[in-house]
Image (tube, rainbow, N blue to C red):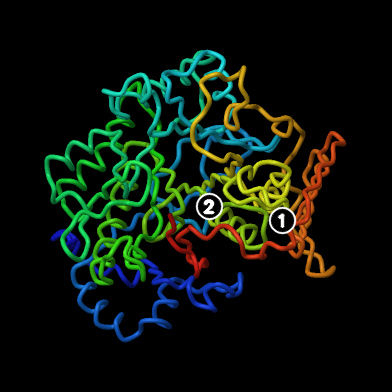
Amino acid sequence: MAHIPDDLTAPLLGSIPINYNAANSEEGRNGSDGQENTYTKALLKKRIALVVIITLSAAAAAVCVITTNPFIFSSSKPNTSPHLHPKATLGALPPRFHFSWDTLPVFFHSANASGPWNDAATSEIARYGMATFEKWQSQGTNPGMTQEENIPVACRQIKAVNNGSTLPTLYYLNSVLDWGTSSLHQLLIDHPDYRLKDAMGQDIIAPLPGSPWCFNLSVPALREAWILDCLNTVTSSDGCDGCFVDRSNNMTEFHVTTSVWNMSLPEAMQFEISHMHTLSELNTRLAAIGGFAVSNNQGLSEQLGTSSIMFEDFTGSEHCITSLRRAASSGLVVQVHAGYIVDDGSNDTFNGCGSGDTNAMAAFLIGMGNYTYYHCAKGWTSDRRWPVQDDVWLDWREEYDRPLGRPLGDAIKSAIGGGIWQRNFSLGTYVEFDGEMGNGTIWWGDGVVQTGLPSGDIPKKRGCRWQSLPWNIDSKFSL
């Protein structure tokens, strides 16, 4: 059974929004984008009696370390100073890396399972704004080596390009799933109590390839080992600049109506308290050494000290535009990943980066802010045969070189029909997105025009549901 660590002594449930299957309700699925409701409000609507009991007991034993570094970057050139932003309460401040509005800002997140990157690949990766190397890096040729050994090699490869690449490189670390690629896996083998248990005391096995165990971060020794797994790659003089922390979103929905996780509601809440505390502590300790974390699907900056997030399930929709606009305006550095959801009306269940990518890209341009990056890819690995074989991560697309320019203002929404989003950029690019039809058009500054196919059968609120964000009331954890 999960337990609350002894060192968690301050109230937490009042500060961390928690969603108990809010998405399964009618109001959860169809609520207004403009609502500022938190998961806590959804919780009160659905489980008011149970919450009162559990909140009173848990509040006495739970804590979340809150950091207050209210910064936001605002320069399109290499940063010389951060600027105060009244809405941003950030933790691990990202390094002052280069960001430019000249062209579409893009990020890289992949792995070469066959071994180290070749020279052509390293040169290509160094062109991106940020680069994360996945857990599978070099696992195919170095099966006896861990990701702690393989990923820093990739970070060093990129830094060696052009006498030292300035883009931040990130080490992958999952906060819930033990994929068996890190040294933490051996700890779970040696210490069964480090593995998360269900209501019957049995190991929880995630229904994913490899049937991974789950980390029980309520165990202080494991929590410290997990945090050090990230810190050690960042403090090393030839390591990575930060960590990409997967599964950073609200995990309280380990309590579900199915038997997949089979955790009781109190156990799920206790697990989530430990999970959130660990993420907050990591952000605090990274900030102390000049590192940072990209928290996948986590946007609770005030509670957890989050400085950077990823939208993993972005698509061309009204809801994603609204969510991105709010995240960007709050001062968060944002990676926007599209490709999971086909949004072009083609019914193509595999390629979410075909013609529908125009819709997602247009939605991104409408909602983006400073330090916001884009990429569309179906998976998280690259083909070792590149550049002979196409690769969605390594291929440098024509759109990446088209002139963009600083936005001439915030995006506006016209009163035509259901409302057309519009935005102009200083180098001549103009973007529209039709929230009703779900398609966008980009008039690039060099005269090229690309239009996405209408996807009117796709709900306006589709996508951007995995994020733990204050306004994302029906966000939910999903495999």
The front one of 443 and 390 is 390
Describe the element under mark 2 as helix, strand or loop: loop
N-terminal of the pair, mark 1 or mark 2, is 2
The front one of 23 and 250 is 23
Circle 2 sits on which residue?
Answer: 331
Q: Residue at x 50, y 13 (%)?
A: 163
Q: Marks 1 and 2: CB-CB under 8 Å?
A: no
Report the number of discs: 2
Q: Residue at x 37, y 27 (%)?
A: 151
Circle 1 sits on which residue?
Answer: 410
* Residue 442, image x, y percentages: 79, 45
* Residue 383, image x, y percentages: 53, 25
* Residue 159, image x, y percentages: 46, 20
**In the drawing, does residue 274 fall left or right of residue 137?**
left
242 in relation to 330, above or below = above
Q: Residue at x 39, y 50 (%)?
A: 247
211 in relation to 417, above or below = above
| Crowd tier of the residue under label 1, counting other residues whose Cα lies within 10 Å: few below 14, some 14–19, many 20 or above | some
Check the picture and name the quadrant holding the N terminus: bottom left
415 in relation to 447, above or below = below
Q: Amino acid at mark 2?
A: Gly
| Crowd tier of the residue under label 2, counting other residues whose Cα lies within 10 Å: few below 14, some 14–19, many 20 or above | many
Describe the element under mark 1 as helix, strand or loop: loop
Q: Residue furthest right?
A: 447
The front one of 164 and 315 is 315
